[in-house]
Amino acid sequence: MTLLIEAQEVESLLSIESCLEALEASFRELADGRAVNRPRTDTFTATSDPDVFYRYKSMEGLVPGCGVMALRINSERIRWPLVDGRRRQDKFQRVYPNRYVGIVLLFSIESGELLAIMKEAYLQKMRVGGTSGLGIKYLAREDAASLGLLGSGWQAGVQLTAACAVRKIDTVKVYSPNADSRKKFADDMGRQLDLPIVPVDRPQDAAEDVDILLAATSAMQPVLEGKWIKPGMHVGSINTRREIDADTLANSDYIVVNTRDTGYAVYIAGSGEGVVPLKEKELDVRACPEIGEVISGKAKGRSSAREKTLFLCNIGLGTQFAAVAARVYQAALDKDVGRRLPPEWFLETVKK
Amino acid sequence: MTLLIEAQEVESLLSIESCLEALEASFRELADGRAVNRPRTDTFTATSDPDVFYRYKSMEGLVPGCGVMALRINSERIRWPLVDGRRRQDKFQRVYPNRYVGIVLLFSIESGELLAIMKEAYLQKMRVGGTSGLGIKYLAREDAASLGLLGSGWQAGVQLTAACAVRKIDTVKVYSPNADSRKKFADDMGRQLDLPIVPVDRPQDAAEDVDILLAATSAMQPVLEGKWIKPGMHVGSINTRREIDADTLANSDYIVVNTRDTGYAVYIAGSGEGVVPLKEKELDVRACPEIGEVISGKAKGRSSAREKTLFLCNIGLGTQFAAVAARVYQAALDKDVGRRLPPEWFLETVKK
């Protein structure tokens, strides 16, 4: 049986606790060499509209502890329009406005069968938020209680939820350039988490007197400045090429990354192909431990109460999708959620 | 609309002529840098059965001239049992006996949408046979009329069909180790192609006095010996790591390959990962022109009537699947074949 799991179903089936647990185990397996990741590749081509590119993106990962292999696919038209003087990334489909193909295919490593096709956006949000949460769990001070958040958009909420799942957070400040959206975020998330959340006017205000500072923005320019980082603080970023400045790296004592495998291949039709290493500003990513190594004890966690730690969720892994998608699949089975597709649709007879 | 196209439908929708035409155009685009290929990657892990591995295999290709991006996936349990003293590759699924997940996903580069999910085995056979046919078209003598075939299995028939589509073949000999199967192949294919096909007892008999010699076997040891190659002959092989001997390379004047990009990555859970370059015996594949370069005129074809040419279909390309799957999709639309799936099943809303 192959389950088709819709976006809202995925959302109803994955809690932050389950997400954190699944990711933690998968990172341990990755660090131990049991899980394997086929790094992300992007394929681009021009379209008939000179402002629009087609982008196909995929990553794959196998996590034996979850019993699955996962493939995540994005197929989308993409453009980078100027909105209010800022460059924005805009994904859309021509035929179905404001939609893109975004799915995770989940395979059983015991039977080979296609277990599920599920929508990927919530998994994407949760695997990033959950991984950021693991950074806090292993790198922030045990007594960290105050948190500053830069960003109030699509990724920001789950960052906060994940932080609250791993630390007793009692004070939150949030900054985003739009006053209405930071106010709305503070109200909504404050109610949801039963926490006082204070919207602030400037990013440096969010960074002041906090134990944890998180950037979770879609900014194309730095919003987090390294000079704000104080002793004992833990800093996290999900968009390390853009939202943090070079001082953030220079002013951190201990930097941990999601993965060192940052040389992902980009194939561009019509202009050759090449491997594009992730530009980490002044950072030599090869010298940084991975979060999986910290989790598994191969690398150290926080060394002292005054250490300034930095965790960079620098690039997505197929194993993250395998871990969270396996949880969604199991929950769908348990709760009888999802549309059952005939497995024969995807099965071939054995070749001679 | 997303079309689900079953195995028998794929077979009914793709002729060898259409296949050859599509592959030829895609190889030209690849040689010109317009099409791009994300090379094959394999991911392995052990299963609870010590004799059985799980293997996940994928390759991707974008062919602008066809308007598509394609992904080919194999997900299967695999073992290599000894049968009659010979090692055989056996693919199967535990839950659905004698089945494996084998699909091609086809995406539109103009709209981004998932156009089709189709069964892959016939596409696999046709892309290999068709590519072998292009080798003959561009490298065999124009007046080549006699053909020797080593192998009578799953791949052999389409090799012959493709050869007949590009040259006026009037004499065919076929060898395979099993007398019954070579007899049956000769009868069946002879009737189908309206050609006299003679089954022969020894591989060297199939190679004697022929203009074209093709190996299309699943043999794990060489069956084609280079000493049989005579001036003016064209030789083709689809399994270049196994079915030809080192003399085949040494005794060829001009060697052309499907692709020089033979360093594909194999990720093995539990034992690290690594790129496994295709072992081409004594061959430096980097020195060989690709068939696409011959097709596009960037590399030469046959130089003389006495030249001994060798074409190695050495590893599969995502672009081959894109080319043939695009033809199947278009024919399915034209003939109203296939099951219409709701495109919403695969569409996500735009991320904020």
Image (spheres, coloured by chain):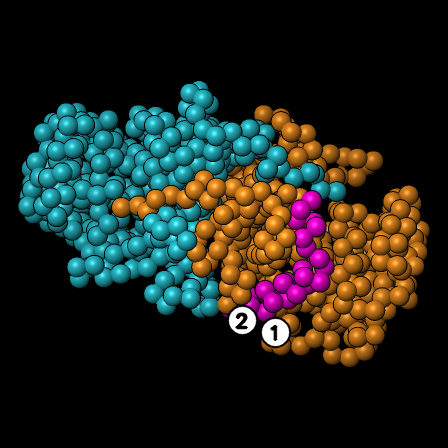
Chain colours: A cyan, B orange
The disc placed on residue B296 is 1
- Please report the residue visible at 92 percent of the width from the left and 53 percent of the height from the top: B199
Question: Which element carries disc 1, helix, strand or loop?
Answer: helix
The majority secondary structure of the magenta stretch comes to helix
SS at circle 2: loop
Q: Tally the numbered discs.
A: 2
Q: In this view, does A138 lie above or below A284?
A: above
Which residues lie in the magenta part?
B8-33
Residue at image coords 21%, 52%: A219
The residue that label 2 is drawn on is B32
Q: Which residue is drawn at 55% across and 46% down?
A: B3
Residue A199 figure quarter? top left
Relative height, residue A44 to residue B183 (above, below): below
Q: Position of residue B93 (x, y in %)?
A: 64, 31
| Left or right of B328, for residue B270 | left
Residue B327 sits in which quadrant? Answer: bottom right
Give the crowd class for mark 2: few <14, some 14-19, many >=20 residues within 10 Å.
some
N-terminal of the pair, mark 2 or mark 1, is: 2
